[in-house]
């Protein structure tokens, strides 16, 4: 069967050998294997992550905000596969995860347990709607690991960010993601809510795109702590964080020449 991966204006079809298909009230789910990327999760025909390169996305998303916020309590909105939660739990951070579709959680535990879905047995997993989730205590860091802005913009509009911020402690960090060509548009929605922003990027092969991550806070972001961290991943290091103006990607942006740039 064919599935697609999209990045920017590009769409590529991949041949997939299905391992299991399920339907939920929210989407069609497939776990399969592709020669190019190994085992992967597909939702409504779109690749969500692959064995080959999931660590690029999840490390670059997880570590900078966790380090800069000195987080003890984290909230993940989305991320029902557990791979982002795995990184936070490994740092000793108490993690709550709110996933809409329980089938994603079940399939991930069945097929991606050793890849990181083991976190779903350790985190506080709540099956529910991110836009309706409430908590008695605020969180140090919140990750908006929901479907891409292009597909569900209402999860990234002013109403949504107002709700997400209500769950954040004073001075905490909210981290989000988006394909590079929609970064400027998305940031326009968050301007009324945060005083400081830092965006960086990584190329994710299975997304065939430069994927951006943004940390948002009312307090100045502690980028010095990120730059001096001893935390290293398979991909993450402070040298691999790139900052750039919304909507602009320097032609000379590369791993070899990029570095963390303070606000």
Image (cartoon, rainbow, N blue to C red):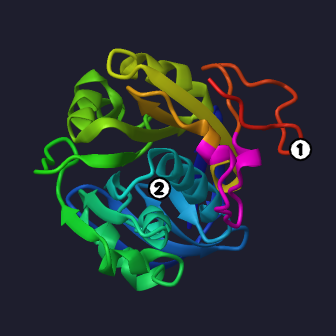
Q: Nearer the viewer, residue 14 or 191?
A: 191
Quarter of the figure with the N terminus: bottom right
Residue matched to label 2:
45
Q: Which residue is drawn at 60% across and 63% down?
A: 54
Element carrying mark 2 = loop
Q: Residue 125's image quarter?
A: bottom left
Magenta-tinted stretch: 225-241
Quarter of the figure with the C terminus: top right
Q: Residue 103's image quarter?
A: bottom left
Q: Residue at x 24, y 69 (%)?
A: 124
Residue 23 point in image, percent of width and height: 28, 67
Residue matched to label 1:
256
Residue 107 point in image, percent of width and height: 37, 76
Magenta includes 231?
A: yes
Instruction: Mark 2: give few (<14), some (14-19) or many (20+) Cα within 10 Å.
Output: some
Q: Going by the image, does 236 lie left or right of 160?
A: right
Magenta includes 223?
A: no
Q: Residue 169's image quarter?
A: top left
Number of numbered discs present? 2
Q: In this view, does 22 lie above or below 222?
A: below
């Amino acid at each position: 069967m064919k599935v697609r991966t999209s990045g920017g204006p590009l769409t590529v079809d991949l041949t997939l050998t299905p391992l299991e298909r399920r339907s939920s009230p929210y989407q069609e789910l497939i776990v399969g294997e592709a020669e190019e990327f190994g085992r992967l999760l597909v939702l409504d025909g779109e690749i969500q992550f692959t064995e080959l390169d999931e660590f690029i996305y999840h490390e670059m998303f997880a570590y900078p905000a966790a380090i800069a916020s000195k987080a003890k309590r984290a909230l993940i909105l989305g991320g029902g596969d557990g791979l982002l939660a795995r990184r936070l739990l490994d740092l000793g951070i108490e993690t709550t995860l709110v996933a809409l579709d329980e089938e994603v959680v079940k399939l991930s535990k069945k097929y991606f347990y050793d890849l990181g879905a083991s976190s779903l047995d350790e985190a506080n997993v709540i099956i529910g709607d991110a836009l309706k989730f409430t908590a008695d205590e605020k969180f140090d860091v919140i990750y908006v690991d929901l479907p891409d802005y292009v597909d569900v913009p209402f999860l990234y509009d002013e109403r949504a960010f107002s709700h997400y911020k209500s769950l954040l402690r004073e001075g905490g960090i909210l981290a989000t993601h988006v394909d590079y060509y929609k970064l400027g548009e998305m940031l326009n929605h968050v301007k009324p809510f945060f005083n400081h922003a830092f965006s960086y990027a990584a190329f994710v092969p299975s997304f065939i795109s430069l994927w951006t991550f943004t940390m948002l806070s009312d307090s100045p972001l502690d980028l010095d702590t990120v730059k001096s961290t001893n935390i290293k991943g398979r991909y993450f290091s402070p040298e691999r964080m790139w900052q750039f103006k919304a909507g602009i990607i320097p032609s000379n942006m590369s791993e070899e020449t990029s570095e963390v740039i303070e606000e």
